[in-house]
Structures are given as structure tokens and as C-alpha cells.
Image: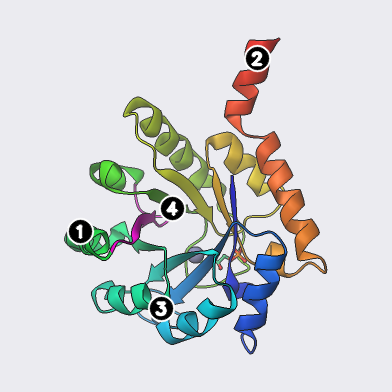
């Protein structure tokens, strides 16, 4: 189980403090939402911000979500800035494959995201080439939106493929994740949870992360299978 707070929900005047706060609160990863004002109707921050944060939180895994029309121009700058993984969108079509190769060349882990209106079948050809699949549970662009329940079958399908094809990609969800929806996603097979508003909005981020982790863990289907086998 990975809990990845999204820095988008932190105070934008103090990204460094937000990153330190998340790390000290027990976050497994830090999720960094990069929006270009073209692929999505909003702008967030770029490689220079990530580079400035990196020395403040040396060891935490940076999960960089590129909601950008031209990720080609951003891979090297984010690699230099300290990204561990970059997520590109399957909606980029024929450019996905070369982007995956470029990330591999750079030694960066590869995530592939699928938006709510896009069919899950679009990601199937890439499943043996990626480290993580991100099933978006809101239309990307803004934090604080409501979880789209229609995305749950896509998570189930992605988890089924993982078992059938004996692959090991992580299965991440992002958008509207709170203590209710985290349980639904975990039951559907997700193992990596991005949460912005529901975590950064709490007075104690540490308590909020611990609680979300506990709920995700309690709803892990592998654990349910184990209990069944033991009883
Ligand atoms: C959506 C972003 C998300 C967002 C999640 O465009 O990709 O990572 O920050 O925020 P919450 O958890 O507030 O929905
Ligand atoms: Zn994101």
C-alpha cells in the first residue's frame, strides 16, 4: 500500500513546507501534479519548483504526474529535478510508446494514466512496459473534485489483467480519494492512493495518512483471500 499525498492541495506559497510536512507525516510517496494549461485547463508548477523542493526531502519517492500536451520537452528537466517516476497519459496516442522508451533511457520509472472518459482497453497494449497504471477517478485539472464511481470497473479490469498476464505494475487511483472512496478502490484492486484535499485539509496530516492507510489495508482483497483461507 502506498499513500501519496498530492502537493497540489498544499499551500502554493509554501511548497517546500508542504513537502516536508507530508514526509514527516509518514507519506510513502509525494505526488506532483504538473499541469500545462493545454492538456488540462489549469496551470500548476514546473521542474524548477520540483528541483527546489528535492533537497528539502531527500529520500521520498517523487511521483510526477504529467498532465501536459508535450511531455517530450519535460522528461529531462524533471529527471534532473529529482523525479523517480513520471506518469504520462494514454490519451497522447501514438506518442506513448516513444515516451516510455525515453523514460527508460533516463532510468525513470514509467507510469501510464487513463482519464475517466477513455476506455481502459487503450492501456492494454502497454501493460508489459510500465511500472504503474494510474486510473484517474476525476477529470484531471483541479483538486477537490468528487470521485467518479463509474471508474471502479476499470480498476477491477486492470487488476484482473495484472493477475491473468502475471504482471507486476502498481495500480494507482487519483482524484476524490477520501476515507470512503479509498476503501472502494482498495476492494477493486488499487494499491497506490493519491489524495490531496482529504489529507492536506486535516489538522494532523500524520493521523489522516495513518487512517487512510489502515482503511486501504483493511479492504485489500489479498488480505480478504488470506482470511478466507485461514477460516
Ligand atoms: C487531478 C490531479 C490530482 C489531484 C487530486 O487533476 O491529478 O492528483 O491533486 O486531488 P484531490 O485528492 O483533491 O481530488
Ligand atoms: Zn495527479
Is residue 133 visible in the rendered image? The answer is: yes
Quote the CA–CA distance across marks 1 and 2: 42 Å
Q: Secondary structure at mark 3?
A: helix
- Residue at the farthest bottom position: 13
| Nearest to N terminus: mark 3 or mark 1 | 3
Quote the CA–CA distance across marks 2 and 3: 46 Å
Disc 4 under 8 Å from ligand 2? The reply is yes
| Nearest to N terminus: mark 4 or mark 3 | 3
Quadrant of the displayed image that contains ligand 1: bottom right
Q: Position of residue 7 (x, y in %)?
A: 59, 73
Q: The C terminus is located in which quarter?
A: top right
Q: Which residue is mark 3?
A: 81
Disc 2 under 8 Å from ligand 1? The reply is no
Whether the magenta-drawn stretch holds residue 125 is answered as no
| Nearest to N terminus: mark 1 or mark 2 | 1
Q: Which residue is mark 1?
A: 101
Q: The N terminus is located in which quarter?
A: top right
Q: Which picture quadrant has residue 59?
A: bottom right
Mark sitting on residue 228:
2
Residue at image point 20% right, 59% down: 101
Q: Secondary structure at mark 2?
A: helix
Is residue 10 visible in the rendered image? The answer is: no
Q: Residues within 10 Å of mark 3 (few under 14, many from 20)?
A: many
| Nearest to N terminus: mark 2 or mark 3 | 3
| Nearest to N terminus: mark 4 or mark 1 | 1
Quote the CA–CA distance across marks 4 and 3: 22 Å
- The stretch of residues the image draws in magenta is 107-119
Amino acid at each position: 500500500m502506498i499513500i501519496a499525498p498530492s502537493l497540489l492541495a498544499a499551500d502554493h506559497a509554501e511548497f517546500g513546507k508542504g513537502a516536508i510536512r507530508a514526509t514527516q507525516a509518514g507519506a510513502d510517496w509525494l505526488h506532483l501534479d504538473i499541469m500545462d494549461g493545454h492538456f488540462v485547463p489549469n496551470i500548476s508548477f514546473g521542474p524548477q519548483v520540483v528541483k527546489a523542493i528535492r533537497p528539502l526531502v531527500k529520500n521520498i519517492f517523487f511521483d510526477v504526474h504529467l498532465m501536459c500536451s508535450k511531455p517530450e520537452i519535460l522528461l529531462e528537466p524533471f529527471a534532473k529535478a529529482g523525479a523517480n517516476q513520471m506518469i504520462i497519459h494514454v490519451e497522447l496516442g501514438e506518442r506513448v510508446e516513444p515516451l516510455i522508451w525515453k523514460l527508460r533511457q533516463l532510468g525513470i520509472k514509467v507510469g501510464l494514466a487513463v482519464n475517466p472518459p477513455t476506455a481502459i482497453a487503450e492501456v492494454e497494449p502497454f501493460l508489459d512496459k510500465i511500472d504503474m497504471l494510474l486510473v484517474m477517478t476525476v477529470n484531471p485539472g483541479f483538486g477537490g473534485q468528487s470521485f467518479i464511481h463509474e471508474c471502479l470497473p476499470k480498476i477491477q479490469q486492470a487488476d484482473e489483467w495484472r493477475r491473468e498476464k502475471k504482471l507486476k505494475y502498481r495500480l494507482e487511483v487519483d482524484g476524490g480519494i477520501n476515507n470512503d472512496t479509498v476503501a472502494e478502490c482498495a476492494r477493486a484492486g488499487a494499491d497506490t492512493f493519491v489524495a490531496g484535499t482529504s489529507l492536506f485539509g486535516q489538522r494532523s496530516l500524520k493521523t489522516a495518512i495513518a487512517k487512510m492507510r489502515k482503511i486501504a489495508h483493511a479492504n485489500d482483497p489479498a488480505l480478504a483471500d488470506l482470511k478466507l483461507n485461514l477460516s
